[in-house]
Amino acid sequence: MTYKEIEHIPKMKNSLNALSPYIGKMRPELASYLINHYSQNEGYIYDPFAGSGTILVEGWRQGHDVIGNDLNYYAYILTLGKTHPYPNKESAINALDSYRNRVEKKVIQYNIEYIPEWIRVFFDSQTLKEICCWVNYLKRNKEWFLLSCLMGILHHQRPGFLSYPSSHGAPYLRTSKYPREDFPEMYQYRNVYEKLYSKITRAYKDMPTFDFEKKRIITNKNTGNLTLKNIHASTIITSPPYMKSLTYARDNRLRLWFLGLDDWRNLDKTISPTQMNFYEMMQKSIYRWSNSQVAGDKCVIVIGDIQSTYNGEKVSMGNALIDLAVDKYNFIEAFSDPIPESRKVVKGNTKINKESILVLERK
Ligand SMILES: C[S@@+](CC[C@H](N)C(=O)[O-])C[C@H]1O[C@@H](n2cnc3c(N)ncnc32)[C@H](O)[C@@H]1O
């Protein structure tokens, strides 16, 4: 297999993939290709570093039971939301409408004084009150899909979003580029119900057909300590964290705050690990994964291929992982998928120029 084959996979239409942003997200076409090639009819597709759930959504779309995990609470909610949408737009809007009156009543007495300044600077105060009330209701009622839609419109500079002009990925205000005096419409109140309604409509524009009988299990644990009980993970497909190059909690700090987690720095210590911690965590993880697989099952690992220090030597991360797994897995094949500048999260990053795809087989 070569990356050229992957390069030419036609673009897929699935509006769930654009529900809310996530750094280090896998190309859905690559997820589709890997599932097509390596999955089996029996058992679950398992992604222990699920991020925004790209692999799980695609696995589910292709008719598999799926199980996923991510320690980042935002990734967990987003993956839950994407794997548990309402079956159609009408039922999603009905659910939204069922909260509308209650939220509107609550907003009247809602006090935002407790909200830290770094959050307040992003929003008109009435919009902020509404966001907080909607998040409270949706979270309390386990409305993961609607909550994910809300996270997806939290901040950006476009009219469909809720914040003052800011970026869509990591939260930065763009007040210098769009000063209030010159762009007053960008600083106006936004009705959260109306924006959510439009977001839901967009989410159903290109929604594929899913089998709602298939199992979708999502957890919020540290993969290194996670044992799957009574699950046969016949195919593992995953992309582990890009070590310090990507900061999953920092870049999602605004969304995480609304979801109830304000110590993003501490979370990043685990989910954006140093090289040493990364290898230790991968060693523990691979051992645990092997317990939910049987001989012949595949474990496909997609990594940003950088040079790293492993056992005192400079080696590529791919080779280090093959060595880490050697007791439990045979190495089958590897191929690379160059990351063009246009797709890089950190522009100009010369450390990661390609993704390596390692295919391992349970001994
Ligand atoms: C490269 S991203 C996965 C992206 C995903 N394939 C997607 O398409 O969105 C790696 C993920 O690993 C998660 N992560 C890092 N360390 C973890 C750990 N010890 N346990 C569970 N999740 C972890 C991060 O939160 C991040 O979401």
Image (cartoon, rainbow, N blue to C red):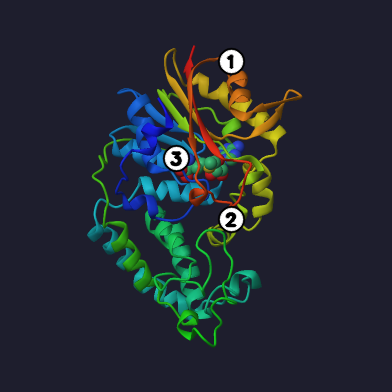
Q: Residues within 10 Å of mark 3 (few under 14, many from 20)?
A: many
Quarter of the figure with residue 41: top left
Q: Which residue matches tag 1?
A: 326
Where residue 206 appears, as percent x and y from the top left, is: 26, 53
- Mark 2 or 3: the one toward you: 2
- Helix, strand, or loop for circle 3? strand
- Helix, strand, or loop for circle 2? helix
Amino acid type of disc 1? Val
Residues under labels 2 and 1: Cα distance?
Answer: 34 Å
Give the quarter the ligand 1 occupies.
Answer: top right
Q: Which mark is residue 218?
A: 3
Residue at image coords 58%, 60%: 257
The answer to the question of whether label 2 and label 3 lie on touching residues, with beta carbons closer than 8 A, is no
Residue at image coords 43%, 77%: 190
Amino acid type of disc 3? Ile
Residues under labels 2 and 3: Cα distance?
Answer: 22 Å
Q: Which residue matches tag 2?
A: 251
Residue 198 versus residue 305 in the image, above or below: below
Amino acid type of disc 2? Asp
Q: Which mark is residue 114?
A: none
